[in-house]
Image (spheres, grey):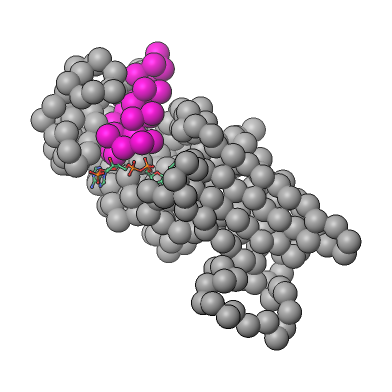
Amino acid sequence: MSNSIIKVAITGAGGKMGMEAVKMVTSTPHFQLVAGIDTQNGGKLFSEIPGMPNVDVPMYTDLHKAFSEHECDVLIDLTNPKFGRKHMEIAFEHGVRPVVGTTGFTEKDVEELSAIAEEKALGAIIAPNFAIGAILMMKFSQMAAKYLPDVEIIEMHHDRKLDAPSGTAIKTAQLISEVREPKQQGHEDEKEELPGAKGADYQGMRIHSVRLPGLVAHQEVIFGGIGQTLTIRHDSIDRTSFMPGIRLAVETAMKLDVLVYGLENIIE
Ligand SMILES: NC(=O)C1=CN([C@@H]2O[C@H](COP(=O)(O)OP(=O)(O)OC[C@H]3O[C@@H](n4cnc5c(N)ncnc54)[C@H](OP(=O)(O)O)[C@@H]3O)[C@@H](O)[C@H]2O)C=CC1
Ligand SMILES: O=C(O)C1=N[C@H](C(=O)O)C[C@H](O)C1
């Protein structure tokens, strides 16, 4: 970093999260937005796009071109599972640190991208959820699972979401699996009369994905014990909930030389 201003580009800038991230970056005094990348608005300035801040910053459709025309420290990627990994690889190639909210990465993707970050000595962050309340929900769930290992996860999202289960549900299951031995839950002879009725199976934990208009991003983790249940629930009712986490990740990525998977690993 040449000075204290962090130069930021955003892939998916025209999407629901991307538009919110553009507002966050342009209203953060020590961040400078240098480029936006999406599929629709290449060749325009943000100031020409309805709903975007009135800044004369260019939009591109080609990430290589954006990086070749602008010095950049951090790429915020908020696109989709098909392109998120490619965008990270392009960022590494150009010496840019990726901060990624896009979900749908496999464990193998995370391992391989970690190896690239290490080789290039570049900080990178992949966070399936940037909302502090969601991080607490996951941490509390991990605490509870040690004592109540019978657990089901119900994640609920808007109906434009591409991936299921959500990145948050998978991360929650991964964190729980660190303290819970894999085990089958429910009746040993149970049978699904309709395929999918029991949800996805992660080491015996069930994950259910609800998709409905009107929802934003919500998750319940339900634990069952003898004579009792415990429900831990988080609701993002607005996408502004993710912005402080993205801001922190951009700042932190500048100080890292490895890839970190999960915001819980960078908050105090
Ligand atoms: N980590 C977190 O806290 C959160 C993560 N997410 C994740 O962020 C991602 C985006 O979510 P959301 O904003 O709701 O989705 P949207 O569909 O609203 O936005 C995605 C945007 O990416 C654009 N896009 C697609 N392909 C490319 C490409 N190759 N290059 C540049 N831009 C591209 C899309 O354009 P087009 O529509 O033209 O294809 C669209 O504008 C999802 O993976 C979601 O799961 C969401 C909320 C919070
Ligand atoms: O697509 C979304 O909207 C969200 N995606 C992330 C996920 O898959 O967990 C984070 C949040 O739930 C919103």
**Residue numbers of the magenta segment:** 7-31
Where is ligand 1, by quadrant?
A: top left
Residue 160: percent from the left, percent from the top?
37, 48
Is 16 rendered above or below residue 51? Answer: below
Quarter location, residue 106 = bottom left
Q: For residue 86: magenta?
A: no
Whether residue 8 appears in magenta in the rendering, the answer is: yes
Instruction: Please tell me which residue is depicted at 40% across the width and 59% down the height of the picture.
Output: 109
Q: Position of residue 129 (x, y in %)?
A: 51, 43
Q: Is residue 244 left or right of residue 47?
A: right
Q: Image point 44% across, 45% down: which residue?
A: 213
**Residue 153, image quadrant:** bottom right
At 41% from the left edge and 56% from the top edge, which residue is drawn?
A: 163
- Say which of 159 and 24 sits in front: 159
Residue at 10% over, 30% down: 43
Task: Reply above or below: 43 against 196.
Answer: above
Q: Quarter of the image containing the N terminus?
A: top left
Task: Quadrant for the C terminus, please.
Answer: top right
Residue 97 location, x and y as percent? Answer: 35, 38
